[in-house]
Amino acid sequence: MSSSTSEPRPVGIISTMAGAPLGTIVPQDEFLHPPAPSGHHSATETTYFGFNIPEHRLNAEIYMWFHPVLKIMSASVYIWRGANLSTLECDYVNHYNYLPMPENGIADYTIPDINLKVKVLEPLKSVHIDFADPDRGVSFDIQFDAIMPPGGRPNSKHFTQAMKTRGNLDLYGEHFKIDGYFSRDHSWGEERRETSRAGPPISWMVGVFDDEFAFHITAFDSAEDKPEWASRYALPPGQNLMWGYVFRDGELFPVTKVRKQTLRERDGLTPRLILLDFEDAGGGKHSLRGDVSASMPWQTWQNMNVFFCLTRWQGARGIGWGDTQDIQMNDYVRTFAR
């Protein structure tokens, strides 16, 4: 761990959209969009699916990252159980950085290099995914059915949506039934530059408890709790929430306020526990404890590391499950790794 005696530096963050009305999402947003108006080569579109089997501490990620200006994409399937110290320690990794964009859009398409097939059965409601790697003995088929409307980021260029998942997984001769929930994600129309920035981790968090309660929050830890990084980065109190929503009892509300604290493993980096208190625009107040059940580090691109964490959320509604993606940059890791 390195240290610095200089004054904490201001955190250069995106403009907070905390409490703003959620964006409008239409069925056409299920599919590909025009690139960012700038026309810059970093313009991207992403689509993210996955599944979890909590009783086996098993999590999986299915991720497509489109670069419409460059006319290429990346695609990946990751499956892991428990705590993993490196990406390649996962049970299964199949990742391609450079692939051609689908010629006919993403309503019904196949990525031949990884034999992944995605079919939209009804936009914003139902999707089916098939995957098979017979050479390595891994395959799955999953039906995704929405339990809620898409939660649109206030700029209407991103949505997250809790889905019911049903299907089967064969993993090197082990057979698993998939019967749970997963929050998928889709973003478009903006640049995603791979620039390395100085700042603390920011977490993309989701959880689904049942057909009537789900949440999504993107936030830093709260400066008022004096996290270790407060000696290096200056984040104004109350400015830690980027955006989020709560779906409860049939209604969707923006998140207006968050208090978040992350406790980490002895390496100083890997999340192990998240304490989360938040309020929504409908007057709801929520307090959750998130224990990490399975994790793996993935460099989405080389200037950034993300800890993907299957998280067990416990609160007044009982037990829920979902992903925590803890996003870290070089300056933070080199300073606070132990």
Image (spheres, rainbow, N blue to C red):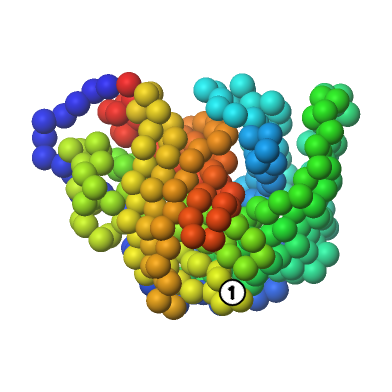
Q: Quadrant of residue 331?
A: top left
Horizontal and vertical percent position of residue 30: 69, 66
Horizontal and vertical percent position of residue 200: 31, 42
Please report the residue visible at 64 percent of the width from the left and 72 percent of the height from the top: 149
Q: Along the horizontal axis of the image, is 125 left or right of 281?
A: right
Front one among 284 and 40: 284
Q: Amino acid at mark 1?
A: Asp
Horizontal and vertical percent position of residue 209: 60, 58
Quarter of the picture containing the N terminus is top left
Q: Is residue 73 visible?
A: no
In the depicted structure, whether residue 148 falls above or below residue 111: below
Q: Quadrant of residue 258?
A: bottom left
How many numbered tags mark residues here? 1
Please report the residue visible at 28 percent of the width from the left and 51 percent of the height from the top: 222
- Categorize mark 1 by other alpha carbons within 10 Å: few (<14), some (14-19), many (20+): few
In the depicted structure, whether residue 149 falls above or below residue 113: below
**Residue that carries the numbered disc 1 in the rendered image:** 249
Front one among 308 and 12: 308
Please report the residue visible at 80 percent of the width from the left and 52 percent of the height from the top: 166
Front one among 201 and 147: 147
Front one among 314 and 231: 314
Q: Along the horizontal axis of the image, is 140 left or right of 250?
A: right
Quarter of the picture containing the C terminus is top left
Horizontal and vertical percent position of residue 37: 51, 66
Please report the residue visible at 59 percent of the width from the left and 49 percent of the height from the top: 321
- Circle 1 sits in a helix, a strand or a loop, which is it? loop
Q: Is residue 49 visible?
A: yes
